[in-house]
Amino acid sequence: MLTSNRFKNSRVYWHAFIAFWGIVLFGYDTFVDPALNNCFGFAYLDESTVGSLEVSTLRSRELDLAVDVLHSGVVANQYFREYFGLIVDGEIDQKRLDAVSSNVVSVLQAGAFFGALGSAPISAKLGRKWTLVVFAVVFIVGAILTTIAGGSNGLAEIYSGRVISGIGIGGISAVAPAYISECAPKNERGRITGLFQIMVTTGVMISYFINFGIGIHIHNDPKVWKIPFGVQLIPAGIMCFGLFTLKESPRWLASVDRNQDAIRSLAYLRKQPVDSPEVIHEMAEIEAAIEEERAARKGLGLKEAFFGKGNFVRFVVAFVIFLFQQLTGQNSINYYAPQIFTSIGYTGTKNSLLASGIYGVVKVITTSLFVLFFVDLIGRKRPLFASAMGMGIVFFITGAILKTHPPQDLPLDGPAPSPPPASQAMAAMLYIYVFFYSLGWGPLPWIYSSEIFPTRTRHYGLAVASASQWLWNFVISKVTPQMLSELHYKIFFVYGTLNIGALAVFALIIPETTGRSLEDMDVIFGSVTAEQRQNEIIRLEKALDAHHEDEGKAKEVTVRESGSVDEKV
Ligand SMILES: O[C@H]1[C@H](O)[C@@H](O)[C@H](O)[C@@H](O)[C@H]1O
């Protein structure tokens, strides 16, 4: 059943596969930082950060070994630092280096925030597909600028390139999930939209391997930043060209009164003739929702989009779900994994890198398993709840182990010893943590926020949702070093409390959306009653049937007259 469905929906999968290449860039770009040639948290782990941590909170041995972790990247980024004037007379200009390293990440996040917000009016006007083309091209311009950066304006080029790439990524992160959700059939919507998260986590992993490879193999050469930035052009190029093979979203087409195009696109995606009962029913549903919404608020002013009946609550849910996703603590670990693994006793370059790398791999695998096999079977609410509870409990256990079994002081020289059992237990906890994240709060906020909005408001909804993600993502990346140094083991208790006290509760109060059509969301969120909607669908189904009958008759007459059939869909 599942297999045949998937085959039946192969065109929708193709749409997702192409549109979500831009999402690989989301994961990749957030964690790529050639100033330090690091990812998985290396972005902020340099001598200055380590130096600024209180010696009382970071034990002396850890301090030394944290610097050791850093050294794997140092060789490669030494060149970057010299080239861009961050090393003066053999001394690192620590302040500038900190600023550059942090800016490389922040300017991307800022660009993405505005790109996400700005995508809404564009996607309302141009449609989903062409908006994605626009943002992919914007991204490519930024990527080229960072790749060719060099000379005395090099840093300025990198910054502006990152802002522009950020705008591209932000726009793509808001439009792609809406587009794919609008193309997907309701019974597989979770799995298809959830491919988003598989692509993000894959992007993070790719950035890890690219950076690691460069750290090892490339030294005195501008390739140290040209390769990581240049590599971005591959997914962006695949996406850009691939988009030309895709159809526009049938729901957007219907929302701008191009109903015949909408039916054609829907029939293509469902691999059905235009007059099949399945296509007619889905089209009637789409039209009913759009007409009802239009009647309820003639014209779509910004105010109505936000405050129309049943709408405001959806915006609140979309905003809060991403605030909470960031409060899971997952990005704290993403950005600072080696630091965190070092602080729980995974000392030495190899141990820490390995621990962080495994973390990334576990995330991709568990996300894929959940999205491909379970999400449409077990719904949205239950996994969100279980995921928050699981993460919370695991964090409390980790915090407790760290408090009672702080890593022991060891001699500073000699090879780094294997991590002690307590550290291994804590690392295992973090892997279990990311398992819980992957089966709930990782993929589901994207799926949920792309399915709860009505078609004429969806682009605003996703813009707010995605901008909220970028805003809180930025905040978390800024406050984590402080939290780590001031709270130490208590950071796990803070995140544990948030997961159980806020996220799990939130999961209980939002409505279930699995297996319901996008149009049903109006009923769920109270913009219309079930009965009203049903009557409207029946009326429109009849109208569409009558339309096809008329068309059929007209065709027969043409055939009789010309003796040939022109079968066009
Ligand atoms: O769903 C994604 C994913 O989990 C990323 O790894 C994270 O960096 C993003 O903030 C999040 O929205």
Image (spheres, rainbow, N blue to C red):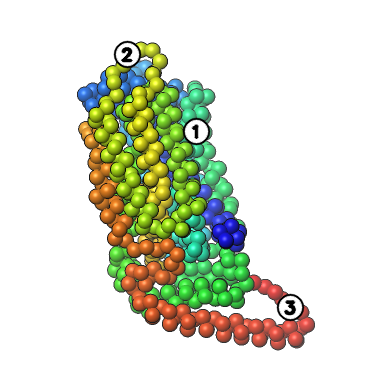
Q: Quick check: 174 above or below 484?
A: below
x, y (%) of residue 105? 37, 39
Q: Residues within 10 Å of mark 1 (few under 14, many from 20)?
A: few
Question: Who's the residue at 23% across and 23% down the image?
Answer: 55
Q: Is residue 205 visible?
A: yes
* Amino acid type of the residue tagged 3 in the rendering: Val
> Distance of mark 1 from mark 2, alpha carbons?
31 Å
Q: Which mark is residue 411?
A: 2
Q: Which mark is residue 241?
A: none
What amino acid does circle 1 point to?
Phe
Identify residue for label 3: 565
Q: Nearer the viewer, mark 1 or mark 2?
A: 2
Q: In the rendering, which numbered label is found on residue 209?
A: 1
The residue under label 2 is which amino acid type? Answer: Pro
In screen coordinates, is 477 left or right of 71?
Answer: left
> x, y (%) of residue 547?
57, 83
